[in-house]
Image (cartoon, coloured by chain):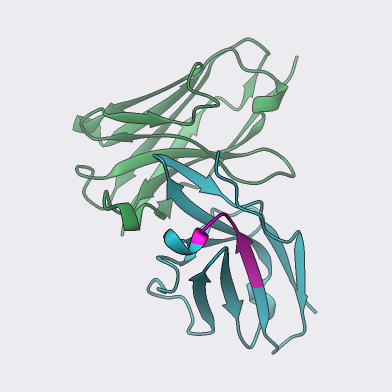
Amino acid sequence: QVQLQQWGAGLLKPSETLSLTCGVSGGSFNNFYWSWIRQPPGKGLEWIGEILHTGRTNYNPSLTSRVTISVDASNNQFSLTLRSVTAADTAVYYCARVASQIISSRYYDYWGQGVLVTVSS
Amino acid sequence: SYELTQPLSVSVALGQTASVTCGGDNIGGKNVHWYQHQPGQAPVLVMYRDSHRPAGIPERFSGSNSGNTATLTISRAQAGDEGDYYCQVWTSGTYVFGTGTQVTVL
């Protein structure tokens, strides 16, 4: 059974950098896209970006100027960096696995437990 | 950018049928996936590629997609089906989620 375990700082001040990591166990890491998704309080889900084990990335155009997703395939981990955070970045952040690279199967079959990140002065 | 519109809330009597819609421009030409999101938990995939149920999801859940509307149907609704439901598509290299629907079982 694939498991995703995520960790990182939960409280930030405006202008700081958000940093989260997601570790994958119980399944193959290669040949899958790995994503970050967030949910602000009282709002819906928002895709942040994804990375392949090779390091190939795709980002949400609305966040691309502030986001970097990196991978450590040797340790089955991938990370999210979001720079210059504001209160609007307060959200529960999830990591998730994309089921397949096939276009018809770009959905999330495994999710991390979620981490609440609060941005407050 | 592509948008997916869902009703804010849907109420269903215990044991009856609930339909959650997801509207988008020619969504029938895309693959639609659905997630159930309950408070304090990670989202769970309940339908993929319009009408396919993942292992462990009851047959009471079904899906369809045509024209400008995709629909998730929950038959014989149970209290455990309560939660927020999100549709999702992949289009133009991005993942788009619907606005979300809160399903309440009365």
Image vertical order of residue A67 relative to residue B46, above or below: above
Task: Please provide percent x and percent y for residue B62.
Answer: 51, 79
The span picked out in magenta is: B20-27
Which residue is rendered at x = 27% and y = 29% of the image? A56
Which residue is rendered at x = 62% and y = 17% of the image? A85
Q: Is residue A113 magenta?
A: no
Task: Please provide percent x and percent y for residue B86.
Answer: 59, 57
Task: Please provide percent x and percent y for residue A91.
Answer: 64, 35
Image vertical order of residue B91 relative to residue B29, above or below: above
Instruction: Please state if A95 lies on the left or on the right of A34 as rendered.
Output: right
Q: Colour of chain A?
A: green
Q: Is residue B22 magenta?
A: yes
Image vertical order of residue B58 relative to residue A111, above or below: below
Please identify the quarter of the rendering in which residue A57 is found. Answer: top left
**Which residue occupies the foreground of this view, B11 or B2?**
B2
Q: In what quadrant of the picture does the C terminus of chain B appear?
A: bottom right
Q: Colour of chain B?
A: cyan
